[in-house]
Image: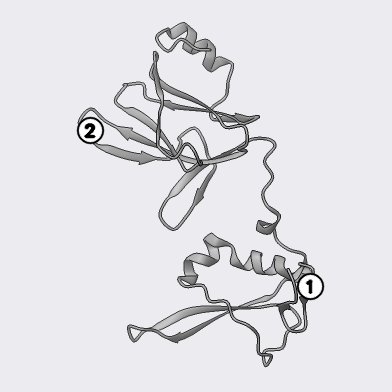
Amino acid sequence: AVDPDSVDSVRRFISRHSFPSAKGGRFLFAYVDEEQRFEVWLRHKLAGHRLPQKMIRCAGGIHLLQMHVPAVNRVEYSFKLIDGEGDETFTLDPLNPASVRDPFSSESVLATPEYRSPAYVDDPPRGARGTLEELLVEGPLGRPWPTWIWSPPLVAHSEALPVIVFLDGGDWLPLGGPRSILEDLVLAPGFDAMTGTLQRI
């Protein structure tokens, strides 16, 4: 426990922990604000905690927050800073070099030692690797439109296959990981490598 009004208590607490840290579903966050300019809120998208949580302003110019979510091993988050005029800014965690990006923003990411990334985000075995080709098609504004076509392995170009269309493919490829997902399907029971289709899932 820490007494937020006691500099000595805060210093002892800081000396015993690293920031940010995560273990056993307990996530500990800190934001250094030596001039005490801001009200600081933690923003994340965890179910049941979707509203920003106000961090505790402590003596010595630091804001602290401990969050207990036993079933969670990974959190993506950012800080909302509100100054004395009520103006808001959003920032990544300066104490955390790890971050992820989505089409709209970047966020800091913190995981417990127990966290394991899902298998579908890993590179599949060589035998499951399909081909990804880029081509230009006529666009709606009279300009060429970049397009990518992924084909499963061992399938001839002349072979007619079902098609899945991802709109905004330029964002989907780096952010959504559809190629990894499709190549993982190659390993799924019932996948027919000659036709590129799943007989059953």
Label 1 element class = loop
Residue at x 48% of width, y 84% of height: 136
- Count of marks placed on residues: 2
Image position, residue 1 (x, y; %):
53, 12
Looking at the picture, which amino acid does disc 1 mark? Gly
Up-down: is 35 above or below 111? above
Image position, residue 45 (x, y; %):
47, 43
Estimate how packed mark 2 is, as few (under 14), some (14 to 19) or many (20 or more) residues with alpha carbons within 10 Å: few
Rounded to the nearest whole Å, what is the CA distance between mark 1 and mark 2? 58 Å
If you read the primary sequence from the N terminus, does the residue marked by circle 1 or circle 2 appear first?
A: 2
Relative to 162, 139 lies left or right:
left
Q: Quadrant of residue 153?
A: bottom right
Image position, residue 24 (x, y; %):
65, 29
Q: How is the image coloured?
A: one colour
In this view, the residue in front, 1 or 101, is: 1
Residue at the disc numbered 1? 190
Label 2 element class = loop
Q: Quadrant of the C terminus?
A: bottom right
Relative to 71, 142 lies left or right:
left
Residue at the disc numbered 2? 86
